[in-house]
Amino acid sequence: MVALAVAAVFVLALAFSLLGLGGGVLYVPLLDGLGYDFKRVAIPTALLLNGLTTLSAAVAHARAGLVDWRGGLPMASTSLAAAPLGALGTRYLATETLVLLFALGLVAAGSRMLAAAGRAEPEALLPAGRRAILTAAAGLGVGAVAGLLGIGGGFLVLPLLLAVGYPTKQAVATSAFIVVFASFSGFAGHVAVGHLHWLLLVGTGLAAVAGAQLGARLMRERMRPSWVKRAFGLLLLGVAARMVWPVLTTG
């Protein structure tokens, strides 16, 4: 079972690093589908994998000069603070509720990205002060959602960065930087509770780093902005449908 998880995580890390995401939107349902407990194993493991995937991709993007460190810091800081609170909240919500919340977030983000796919790249960012206020406020919600649902929050971060005027490739790279903070902070909240599967964490962690390095390189050299947006939107809608279907049919 662990070997299958490792192979799947490598492929997912490669694919998601193309979009500036950690992969939690699929790591969680993947691990859940392989039989690991949704709240006690899948969510904390996905948070660690998110952090490793996005950290690896962010380092690669930074070498190419694509990461906006200063612009991403307000959202990274507030998401770092909020993620442990979301992680602690998992004990108070039923699994079915978490799944439905997860799916609703995916549908909203996926629809937003598909709507933006045909638009031209922005010509300018919003003013620095306004951009910092908007992203810092959004980071609180991103962090809480990340810790609660076992995701890095990239499916929320990327549309927000595009909305404040980032070109697609810079938004992907800066999103990877921001998601690192919420992912590791949320994982730390789960470590405090003690929900760990060490063999799974080590094996899939190594696979996530390797896949992310390859994916980041492909994103810089091969991907077009419109491809990124369409792939992102369709992926999120597909995952949302896959996750919510069992809950609705058994409810």
Image (cartoon, rainbow, N blue to C red):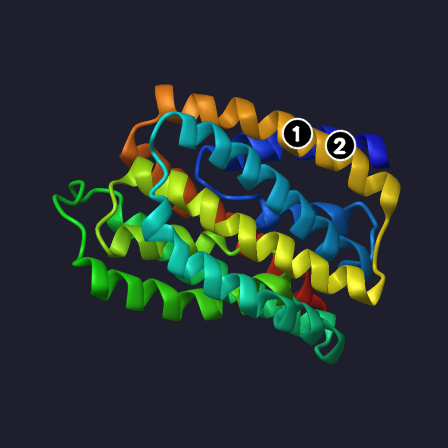
Instruction: Identify the residue shown where x is 18% and y is 44%.
Output: 119
Q: CA distance from mark 2 to mark 1?
A: 6 Å
Badge 2 element:
helix
Q: Quadrant of residue 150?
A: bottom right
The percent position of residue 49, horizontal first and vertical second, equals 66, 43
Instruction: Identify the residue shown where x is 68% and y is 35%.
Output: 9
Q: Residue furthest front?
A: 70
Instruction: Identify the residue shown where x is 64% and y is 67%.
Output: 84
The percent position of residue 228, horizontal first and vertical second, equals 36, 36
Q: Amino acid at mark 1?
A: Phe
Q: Residue furthest bottom?
A: 92
Q: Mark 2 — residue? A: 6
Image-based side of 22 in relation to 69, left or right: right
Badge 1 element:
helix
For the question of whether residue 251 can be seen, the reply is: no
Q: Dot 1: within a 10 Å radius of its alpha carbon, few (fewer than 14), some, or many (20 or more) residues?
A: many
The percent position of residue 145, horizontal first and vertical second, equals 55, 66
Instruction: Identify the residue shown where x is 41% and y is 60%.
Output: 75
Q: Mark 1 — residue? A: 10
Q: Quadrant of residue 88?
A: bottom right
